[in-house]
Image (cartoon, rainbow, N blue to C red):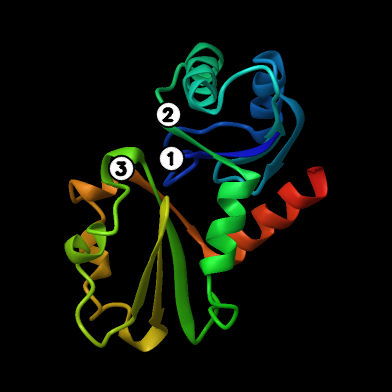
């Protein structure tokens, strides 16, 4: 089965620095195959047949702790789970000069449609959709500051998600498809 590991909070603001080549080796040493990293923010595509899906994140968190001395939350998504996110993602959404569009990948603790009511997005400032395991958010660039979404950082909810922009999410998906 093909998976992606989404690491939360690495190589951000000079904190929790992890070299991607070394991370690839750590994943291989942990028993993962076909390991590929994508950009420096902790996106690792890999194959695994030996462990149940639920145990992969625990094994990878331990490997990162052992090899790098860091406690980094790892979210694992399978190719079918990523396919569902991509299918829910409007094709017109971009992350560019005119639009800021993100995928908020959710840990189980907050993975429920009711999360939409808890997000700080102000009415009429953007669009939000729930898809199992993720919230899709798009805001016109001119509304980003006024949208309220910047209040998400530092909130209780923010600890239970990891964010990727739509361009990164789509590229991760393409890499997962190529690995399949």
Q: Nearer the viewer, residue 55 or 157?
A: 55
- The correct choice, above or below, for 37 with respect to 65 in the image is below
Numbered label tally: 3
User: Which numbered circle lies on residue 8?
Assistant: 1
Crowdedness near tag 1: few (<14), some (14–19) or many (≥20) residues, C-alpha within 10 Å: many
Q: At which x and y percent is residue 84?
A: 56, 58
**Position of 112 relative to 167 (above/below):** above
Q: Quadrant of residue 32?
A: top right
Q: Position of residue 41 (x, y in %)?
A: 55, 46
Q: Which residue is mark 2?
A: 72
Q: Residues within 10 Å of mark 3 (few under 14, many from 20)?
A: some
Q: Nearer the viewer, mark 1 or mark 3?
A: 3
Determine whether, in the image, residue 180 is placed left or right of residue 114: right
Contact flag, marks 2 and 1 (Cβ < 8 Å): yes
> Upstream in the sequence, badge 2 or badge 1?
1
Q: Nearer the viewer, residue 90 or 24?
A: 90
**Residue for badge 3:** 160
The correct choice, above or below, for 104 with respect to 22 in the image is below
Name which of mark 2 and mark 3 comes first in the sequence.
2
Mark 2 or 3: in front is 3
Residue lying at 23% horizontally and 73% vertically, measured from the top left: 121
Q: Quadrant of residue 152?
A: bottom left
- Image height check: is 148 above or below 41? below
């Amino acid at each position: 089965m093909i998976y992606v590991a989404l690491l939360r909070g690495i190589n951000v603001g000079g904190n929790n620095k992890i070299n991607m080549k070394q991370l690839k080796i750590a994943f291989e040493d942990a028993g993962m195959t076909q390991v590929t990293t994508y950009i420096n923010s902790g996106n690792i595509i890999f194959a695994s047949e030996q462990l149940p899906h639920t145990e992969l994140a625990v094994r990878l968190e331990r490997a990162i702790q052992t090899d790098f001395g860091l406690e980094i939350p790892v979210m694992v998504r399978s190719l079918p789970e990523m396919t569902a996110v991509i299918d829910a993602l409007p094709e017109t959404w971009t992350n560019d000069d005119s639009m800021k569009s993100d995928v908020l990948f959710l840990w189980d603790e907050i993975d429920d449609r009711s999360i939409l009511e808890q997000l700080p997005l102000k009415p009429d400032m953007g669009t939000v959709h729930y898809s199992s395991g993720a919230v899709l958010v798009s805001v016109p660039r001119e509304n980003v500051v006024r949208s309220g979404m910047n209040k998400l950082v530092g909130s209780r909810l923010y600890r239970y998600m990891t964010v990727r922009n739509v361009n990164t999410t789509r590229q991760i998906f393409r890499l997962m498809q190529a690995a399949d």
